[in-house]
Image (cartoon, rainbow, N blue to C red):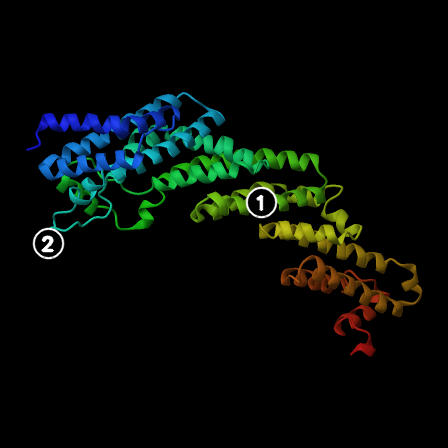
Amino acid sequence: MLGPEEFEKSKKEMEDLMINGLLLYVKDGTIPQFNNQAEAHMKCFHIVYNFTDYGYGDEFLKFHNDKIKEAVDGCYERIKNLSGFDFIDSFIDCTNKINYLIWQMSRIFMYTSNYHLKGTDDEKNERKYKEDNVCEFSMYIYKQCFFDKLENKIFSSMNEILVREERNGNYEFRAKLDTMMKTLQSMDYTKPMMRGRNATAKCWGEKENDPNKLKLHYQDKWYNYFKQETIKYLKNKAENDIKNNSAPDYVKCELKYLKEEDERLNSYVNKDFHASIKEINYEYLIKNNAQKIVDMDTGVNNMFKNKKKDELIGVYQLFSFYPESLKLIQTSFRAYIKERLLALYNDKEFSEEPKKIVPALIKLKKEMDEIVALCFENDKNFQEQENEEFSILITEEHCPKHLVKYADECMKNGFKEKSEE
């Protein structure tokens, strides 16, 4: 008969064989030195095997949980006052070591998981819930005594340090962000309460069945930090970029940034948050500066005037992310068409020979059509704006009387030479 005294001696033997070495590794990184690790593991496993069968399953679960908690509490005390990169690096290091400890401990206490922690609500008295094992209890302790206590610092550090550095081009931080996000995501499911065997099984039976209500619990909290950091970062970026760049350079800069931002979102941001973050990008980088991009000395008006088609292509691509801003380009485009048409009307050559206005109008219309096709991807709205502006200006109200007849005929003919019909 294995009694309490033998049980205590056996726990001490397990500590000496493996557990103290594993705890020391978590504490300071000292690699456990086992004379024969496989033999030590099997001895520990057989102790658990024998005492669990003698009714010490609950005691072994408590012993396991106490050791995990000892390691987790030690990690928390070591890093709770750290900040910046020291905190992030230490958090990742502690999490990796705790994961190693959990893996090793789960091998030792496997018998307790498989034959003691099982559901008993079903008629056949068979294991009902896969999750009710010592690994899950370990992760619950990690969550409760480490992650949750450091939660705010984790979220703020990820956003104020890792995200900011990564956005500034330090892509080596993406690996750390990925590690932190995987840890964060692993917290987004219900954990078992540390109770007796039957209560544990019932607890798992009460898990929320709707994954949409569970999966974003911690990510929602992280996103609140991420959103505020994004707003703060973009506000500063947009102000500096518009101040220190020409319009075409600003456009190139933000197109490059938005492409990189898509890569970042796909790398470490839950898809549910992509749309809202993109809206913030478009608001600060496009909406708030769109009118400035039009009006700057190097802006859209200048691009039309100096026929800088490549630059117009860039502006259209950028503004297309925030379609409302395209109306500003359309307004500028119409003003440009009006300017060019009025210049034709005021040409003295056509005062003397009004018929010559026809080929000039056809040439101008083709030029505007090419701009719509090349710079604005044949956008129907731009086509309509162009056609409407020509229609308005080729009327008696705007066109000189000596030209209106020929201009009107040209428009009715679809701005084509008669030989083209």
Disc 1, disc 2: CB below 8 Å? no
Element marked by disc 2: loop
Q: From the viewer's perspective, is residue 293 above or below residue 157?
A: below
Q: Residue at x 48, y 48 (%)?
A: 275
Q: Amino acid at mark 1?
A: Glu
Q: Position of residue 25 (x, y in %)?
A: 36, 27
**In the picture provided, is 356 more to the left or to the right than 177?**
right
Q: Position of residue 385 (x, y in %)?
A: 67, 60
Q: Quadrant of the C terminus?
A: bottom right
Q: Earlier in the sequence, mark 1 or mark 2?
A: 2
Query: Would residue 220 be visible to someone looking at this image?
Result: no
Q: Quadrant of residue 76?
A: top left
Please give the residue where the numbered disc 1 appears in the rendered image. Answer: 260
Please give the residue where the numbered disc 2 appears in the rendered image. Answer: 124
Q: Quadrant of residue 75?
A: top left
Q: Residue at x 51, y 39 (%)?
A: 174
Question: 295 or 27, which is in the foreground?
Answer: 27
